[in-house]
Amino acid sequence: MLEIKRVASFEEPELAPYRTMRRHQEHRARRIFVAEGVKVVARLLASELTVKSVLLPEEWFAHFRPLLVRRPEPLIQIRIAPKKIVEELTGFSMFQGVLAVGQVPEPPDLERVVEKSAPPRLFAALDGLTNAENVGAAVRCCGAFGVQGLIVGETSCSPYLRRAVRSSMGAIFRIPAVETESLVEALDRLRARGVKCVAAHPRPELRRLSETNLRKDCCLVFGSEGYGISERVLAACDEAAAIPMPPEVDSLNVSHAVAVFLYEANRQRGRA
């Protein structure tokens, strides 16, 4: 059922998630996230995630109606407002003024993610990524290269932050994401199940990426550009590999490194 209303007051309770888009902790406590933009909202509406509400200009409602009427929720609140009003409400300048609120899914169990994945398994893990846009771009690469599960370490930001969801272009809606309290422990559990953990490391003296066997079950581990992978996480990996680069280039943006490593894994598996 769709409850369709025009925005009459910014104080309407159902608009609270849009008023508080900068207050990440409040959203995290309520286990909700905001999707922004026509493509991302469309991918949310086409996903299996729970949708709570949609806020959009009237000219976009007809575009989304076919997706909305097929949703299984007993109630979705649709709020109509001109883009200028949406921007005033949220405090953000927007290209289209289309937003939606979804429910963060229940955290998947790591062992269950492994069991449900077809071999050769391909996972990715993030250590120390605090920039939401980098996290989102990494998730987008994971979606492009068939990653079956994402492990987000305790020092990384959530892939369900608004900017991360936007940068992922909705890829986070279809990748199981395990937000762990201990990435080291999660990697140990993967290794116990025969999953090789390979750290992406910039040191040129390490094994080249192309020389690293990624044909069997593996988890590729990525750190931040500034600090790389922490020593504890690096020690929890089976091996480290580097992308060959000239000495005057010290690192790539993490999302670029994710793309290169995942492409190589797909190439070795005959999928590229």
Image (cartoon, helix red, strand yellow):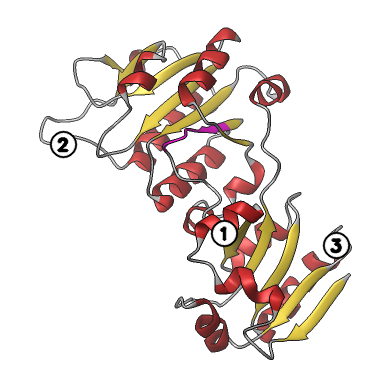
**Residue 136 at x, y percent in the picture:** 47, 49
**Residue closest to the eye, 84 or 266:** 84
Q: Is residue 269 visible?
A: no
Q: Residue 223 falls in which quadrant of the image?
A: top left
Q: Which residue lies under the disc numbered 1?
A: 26
Q: Which mark is residue 249?
A: 2
Instruction: Please give the name of the residue rendered at 51% of the width and 19% of the height, measured from the top-left corner.
Output: 185
The Cα atoms of the two marked residues, 1 and 2, are separated by 40 Å
Which amino acid lies under the numbered mark 2 shown in the image of this protein?
Answer: Val
Q: Which sits earlier in the primary sequence, circle 1 or circle 2?
A: 1
Residue at left offset 74%, top offset 56%: 46
Label 3 vs label 1, nearer the camera? 1
- SS at circle 1: helix
Where does label 3 land, which residue? 70
In contact (CB < 8 Å): disc 1 and disc 2: no
Secondary structure category for the residue under label 2: loop
Q: Amino acid at mark 3?
A: Arg
